[in-house]
Image (tube, helix red, strand yellow):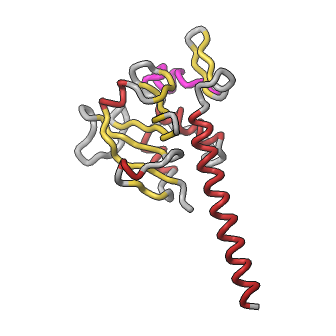
Amino acid sequence: MTLRILFLTLAVLSWTSFAYSETTERIQSLAANALEKRNYAHRDGVIKLYGIRTNGPDTKNGKLACAKVVTIILQKAGIVDKYALGVRHVEAALKNWQKIENQKDLKPGDVVVWVNRLKGRDDQQCTGGGNCHVGILTENGYFHNSPIAKAPTFGGFSLLAFKFKMGYRLPD
């Protein structure tokens, strides 16, 4: 009987670990492949990521679209039900995720929050208006919505305006 319980426990732990790594890989893959032609469209001034417009009036024409871009990826991965329009809403959705406090410990698939070096609050609270920024670390670099280009991108000059606040990793 004890061996049977041990086997079942190991099976559950293995499945949980597999589900975690599969979901993390899906987040990383969706973000890493987001700018491929089949997933990204920029036509007549309208930008769509996985068929969802990122630069509409809800995001000030893409200027404040970082949270929406990240939650489009998380929604496609089956993590969240709706899109967020603010970094604080992304952080609230990830409140049960593991917090990564050192940028060196980040892994592909982690969601990353930065604070604006000029507009950011001393207490690092994300309150809107561009004082925080959010993206996803991929094997291609940080995937985010550039506040300068007002479009989804990898890395880039705009990230220099921000300093690392926190990473979030899907719990095991």
User: Which residue is at 72% across, 84% downward?
Assistant: 5
Up-down relation of residue 101 to residue 155 (above or below) = below
Q: Nearer the viewer, residue 116 or 83?
A: 116
Quadrant in the picture for the N terminus: bottom right
Q: Position of residue 156 (x, y in %)?
A: 40, 25
Q: Is 37 situated left or right of 61 in this image?
A: right
Q: Which residues are magenta?
A: 52-63
Residue 150 colored magenta?
Answer: no
Relative horizontal placement of residue 16, taking residue 63 as reference (left or right)? right
Q: Quadrant of residue 60 in the image?
A: top left
The image shows residue 41 at horizontal and vertical percentages of 62, 18
Above or below for 1 versus 25: below
| 171, 58: nearer the viewer | 171
Residue under the point 67% across and 57% down: 19
Q: Residue furthest top?
A: 44
Residue 108 x %, y %:
51, 45
Does residue 145 appear left or right of residue 126 in this picture?
right
- Measured as percent of width and height from the top left, residue 128 is found at 37, 36
Q: How many marks?
A: 0
Q: Residue at x 56, y 39 (%)?
A: 71
The C terminus is located in which quarter? bottom right
Q: Quadrant of residue 112?
A: top left
Residue 44 is left or right of residue 67, and the answer is right
Residue farthest toward the bottom in the current orientation of the protein: 1
Residue at the image position 54 percent from the left and 55 percent from the top: 170
Rendered view: 108 above or below 47: below
